[in-house]
Image (cartoon, rainbow, N blue to C red):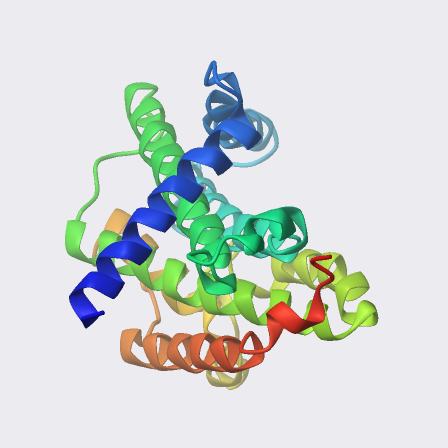
Amino acid sequence: MSSFEFAARNVRVIKALMLRETVTRFGREGLGFLWLIGEPLMFCIGVLVMWSLLKPEYEHGVRLGPFVMTGYMCLLLLRHQSAYSLGALQGNIGLLYHRQINVLSVYITRNLLEFLGSTAAFVVVYAVLIIMGQVTPPKDWGLLLGGWMIMCWISTGFALSLAALSLRSEVMERLVPLIQYTLIPISGAFFMVEWIPNKYREPYLLLPFPHGIEMVRAGVFGEFVPTHFNAWYAIMVGGVLNFAALILLADARSRVDIE
């Protein structure tokens, strides 16, 4: 089999798995998929209403609407990919009887479905908030799209690494929810890197997550709001995470009971 035929076969397998996952998770009527969009929309609107009553429209010179939207949608992508990757293999054990389906196909399907769903949710939430007058169109589409893709790259490596480690250790599986909660304060979703004192800023930026979020915010806010990111550093760390995940998943099939 040529490399082209091998790639084409795997694309067909992933497409079929995505259709199956979509029907299983969201149902045939599509109402579940609407909730994927409705949940972040209600959260963003709810937070904006609450903060508008308690805080001024601008915090540290940053408008609250786009600040909440960009932070929460990036955090949602990060958390959903890691959450739904965790039990991906165990939930699809029966499929491993098929010779054409491998472990990596199962994980790629889950992460790709989460990326597409979160992207659709982001687009709809952004459009609704524009209509409501809470946000403005992006100032730099390139930075916005680049930051979102980098978030996906990092989130995928992070999610696959957690999933692979969970297969090896039951303790790690128990720790994943705690790690997800830890992402809320450390990811940079609900504060700007500019707000961190200078002496702590560089150490904090060793984490890969804020780079993608800051890029998304730079695309939305434009040059008049200070942002701090290094796209190449984030891509490199994401590559390390994805490479480590592939190594850890190499023997994943032998770590689940498919009898």
Residue in view at x 25 percent, y 62 percent: 7
In the picture, measured across the screen, residue 135 lies left or right of residue 107, that is left
The residue at 56%/36% (across/down) is: 55
Q: Tell me how many marks there are.
A: 0
* Residue 140 shows in the view: no
Q: At 21% from the left edge and 43% from the top edge, which residue is drawn?
A: 138
Q: Is residue 38 above or below residue 192?
A: above
In the foreground, 251 or 77 = 251
Q: Position of residue 245 (x, y in %)?
A: 52, 75
Residue 243 against residue 65 in the figure, above or below: below
Q: Position of residue 122 (x, y in %)?
A: 37, 37
Q: Is residue 197 visible?
A: yes
Question: In x, y percent, where is residue 4?
Answer: 17, 65
Q: Quadrant of residue 174?
A: bottom right
Q: Residue at x 35, y 82 (%)?
A: 236
Residue extending furthest toward the top:
29
Q: Quadrant of the C terminus?
A: bottom right
Residue 11 rendering spot, x and y as whole percentages: 29, 53
Q: Quadrant of the N terminus?
A: bottom left
